[in-house]
Image (cartoon, helix red, strand yellow):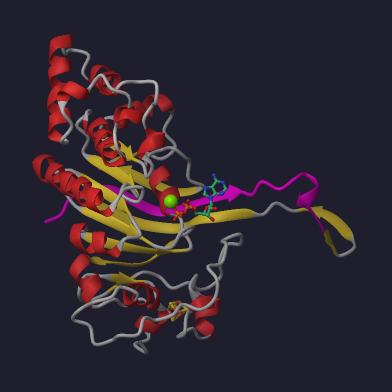
Amino acid sequence: MSTPLIQISGLEKAFATKESWLGQWRFHRGKFKKHQDSIHALNGVNLTINQGETLCVVGETGCGKSTLARAIMGLINPSAGEIHYLDQRIDHLSDQQRMLFRRRMQMVFQNPYASLNPRMTVYQTLKEPIIFHNPELSLAQVDQQIDDLLESVGISASSSDRYPHEFSGGQRQRISLARALSVEPDFIVADEPLSALDVSVQAQVLNLMMDKQEERNLSYLFITHDLAVVEHFATRVAVMYLGRICELAPTNTLFNQPKHPYTRALLSAIPRLDSNTAEPIRLIGEVPVPTEQPIGCVFQARCPYANQRCYDESPAMIAQEDTSSVACHAIEEKRL
Ligand SMILES: Nc1ncnc2c1ncn2[C@@H]1O[C@H](COP(=O)(O)OP(=O)(O)O)[C@@H](O)[C@H]1O
Ligand code: SF4
Ligand SMILES: [Mg+2]
């Protein structure tokens, strides 16, 4: 039985667009009116992350994945909705209240070059959080923890007095992971942690993350656009489009029976040896920029199955018999 660790409900985030003062005025019915566009990066996201699972989030650039990650980590305040960690509400916490969660939740970023302080040695980088979260440890114990942690991510303890630029990209990402693990978190948000790395190194970092998960019953929210990684690594997959989750399914179910038209199009682009359907589904139309609160289905402009209802009414997530959930009128109406 899976136990929820993080529960997200009705999460919304709108960013005010940075227009010049003059650009904010619009001529409307004979008068100038002030008009501020905003970007609706998240539009009512509901999601549960269970203890010990890897929930992968996939979707095109700009669909709101990083915004979701940052809202969960408390790096931005949502415009609406709630985020719970076990039974504690954690959105809109003050900095001081959030300190209690800093230890339990950690984030690994896309760019290991930018996320490590270039002026700190690896030893200094790891020492700070370990001392902060374990003030009772002696210096010798701290040093021992740093050595153990580095060895556990495949970095020689003897290189701990080196600076980030002296390591390769893959080593740096493993050091970032060591830093995240240094406080023994329950939950790690990884926002495209592999995309700056060579393919051979990606596998090493991924295997390391899986080993750590097994050792510590860690939960991951793992953002990636690499579907091969998703298939290998995810327990469940959330497919996002324009600030909404359109399909959520256990990994096998998603890859064997994708349901939402967008998921089908995404998966059809992966070449498969065993596949009979050779032709990828081409998505027509641009990804719209979410400046307006969408009316109807967010995928309507690119969907070959859209009907009038899709333009009028936003589809709700509906649970399917195979434990996946899909937000699509065509699926509900059984015409797809
Ligand atoms: N700080 C910000 N200010 C204004 N717009 C933002 C900001 N952060 C993200 N956005 C916009 O929100 C949308 C979602 O962005 P993001 O969450 O980064 O998407 P993803 O990570 O899926 O590529 C995009 O249209 C992006 O331009
Ligand atoms: S709700 Fe309508 S527009 Fe949206 S994905 Fe389903 S069929 Fe397409
Ligand atoms: Mg992103």
Q: Is 118 situated left or right of 204 in this image?
A: right
Outermost residue, right direction?
Answer: 30
For the image, the number of numbered tags is 0
Identity of the residue drawn at 26% across and 75% down:
320
Residue 159, image quadrant: top left
In percent of width and height, residue 6 lies at 28, 47
Identity of the residue drawn at 38% across and 76% down:
265
Residue sitting nearer the eye, 293 or 255: 255
Q: Is 318 situated left or right of 13 in this image?
A: left
In percent of width and height, residue 142 lies at 17, 16
Instruction: Quadrant for the C terminus, please.
Output: bottom left
Residue 282, image quadrant: bottom left
Identity of the residue drawn at 40% across and 74% down:
262
Q: Is 80 situated left or right of 57 in this image?
A: right
Q: Vertical placement of 329 versus 168: above or below?
A: below
Outermost residue, left direction?
Answer: 215
> In the image, is residue 165 part of the stretch drawn in magenta?
no
Q: Vertical placement of 210 versus 124: above or below?
A: below
Q: Vertical placement of 76 versus 67: above or below?
A: above
In percent of width and height, residue 106 lies at 30, 36
Is residue 26 in sight in this rendering?
yes
In percent of width and height, residue 166 lies at 31, 29
Residue sitting nearer the eye, 36 or 94: 36
> In the image, is residue 5 part of the stretch drawn in magenta?
yes
Residue 113, image quadrant: top left
Residue range highlighted in magenta: 1-26
Is residue 4 in sight in this rendering?
no
Q: Is 182 situated left or right of 17 in this image?
A: left
Instruction: Quadrant for the N terminus, please.
Output: bottom left
